Image (spheres, rainbow, N blue to C red):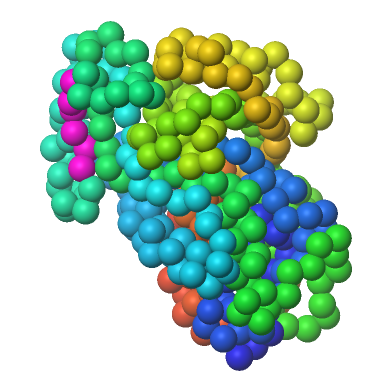
Amino acid sequence: MAALTVMGGGVFGLALAFVAASRGARVQVLEKRRIGAGASGGVVGALAPHVPENWNAKKAVQLDALLMAEGFWTQVARVSGRDPGYARTGRLQPVADAAALERARARAESAADLWQGRAVWAVRPAADFTGLVPVSPTGMVVHDTLSARLHPRRALAALAAGVVALRGRVVERADTPPEAGPVVWCTGYEGLAALSAVHTRSMGAGIKGQALRVAYDALALPQVFAEGLHIVPHADGSVAIGSTSERDFDAPDTTDAQCDALLDRARTLCPALTEAPVLERWAGVRPRARTRAPMLGPWPGRPGHYVLNGGFKIGFAMAPLLGSIMADLVLDGRDNVPDGFRVTDNL
């Protein structure tokens, strides 16, 4: 099999490397700082579907990715001997008023058609649930069984260990690509800036996010999504809360009052968190492609080089499937890139 170099040790790069190594390719991952130094090293880990309506290619691809996630992360755990923290625990969303209740019930019917029994979107009384339950003005919540959680840092560590177990290399503090062989650039928002500079137009940008973890043992309870906020229980006895979306920022990795506001909102939405102490605050910059969909494919005008980038907010959910599609392209020459996901769609 051909040698493959992956530039970048985030979830896209490591997922691709793991898939390629699993197929017998000789793989090396070069990360210029440390594994998870960028947006993938965050704390939230929400793997959640789009609303089941106004269906499009992006939503269909994400559905496929979420449905394959359990098998992928089970394989990663088996090969690496490490737990990535994956569990398909579902999600609760409060229903604000009568109009929202009507929409939620219509979406339940749409989900039944689109998800074809592989997962459920149901409207249920909030009283059916205990523990981490959002305040709901109508007393009703949407409960979906497709959403899952993943511990970002443990998942990256498991992927890296899996690559090594499959006789690949993972090298930190290395940023010089080889002269020969296919090279795939999975370099986050800095990679988007490099693409933009080469092609003299914006192909995407970095969006800063702040998040935090609190000590609350919710174990396998559903995550909560309300008012744009993800509240995600993890198996280590913590709950992650995030995140902000900041187009303009002075520093990529510092937290401020906006992070404190996340905590206040989460405690209002889920009173069970009122006394939960803060364990950690985090900030990082996530790569958002111009089209808002991830981009993958050949680097235009740079033979032998490829791009896998732009996993804004959905990187962990999409990584297993996109890593497989990219391995098809680079290793076997099979182009299964979905419509709207090509690098050229951003030119």
Q: Is residue 56 left or right of residue 150?
A: left
Image spot of residue 264 (x, y percent): 55, 11
The verdict on residue 11 being magenta is: no
| Part of the protein shown in magenta | 120-125
Residue at horizontal 57 percent and vertical 54 percent from the top: 155
Question: Does 206 sit above or below residue 176?
Answer: above
Which one is nearer the viewer's eye here, 188 or 21? Answer: 21
Residue at horizontal 18 percent and vertical 21 percent from the top: 125
Q: Is residue 138 left or right of residue 109?
A: right
Q: Quadrant of residue 51?
A: top left
Using the rendered image of the protein, determine whether residue 291 is visible from the camera's viewpoint. no
Image spot of residue 60 (x, y percent): 33, 53
Q: Is residue 345 left or right of residue 278?
A: left
Which one is nearer the viewer's eye here, 343 or 206? Answer: 206
Question: Does 17 sit above or below residue 291?
Answer: below
Q: Quadrant of residue 198?
A: bottom right
Image spot of residue 339 (x, y percent): 42, 59
Main SS, magenta region, reads strand
Q: Is residue 95 left or right of residue 82?
A: left
Residue at horizontal 43 percent and vertical 12 percent from the top: 271
Using the rendered image of the protein, determine whether residue 285 is visible from the camera's viewpoint. yes
Image spot of residue 72 (x, y percent): 44, 64
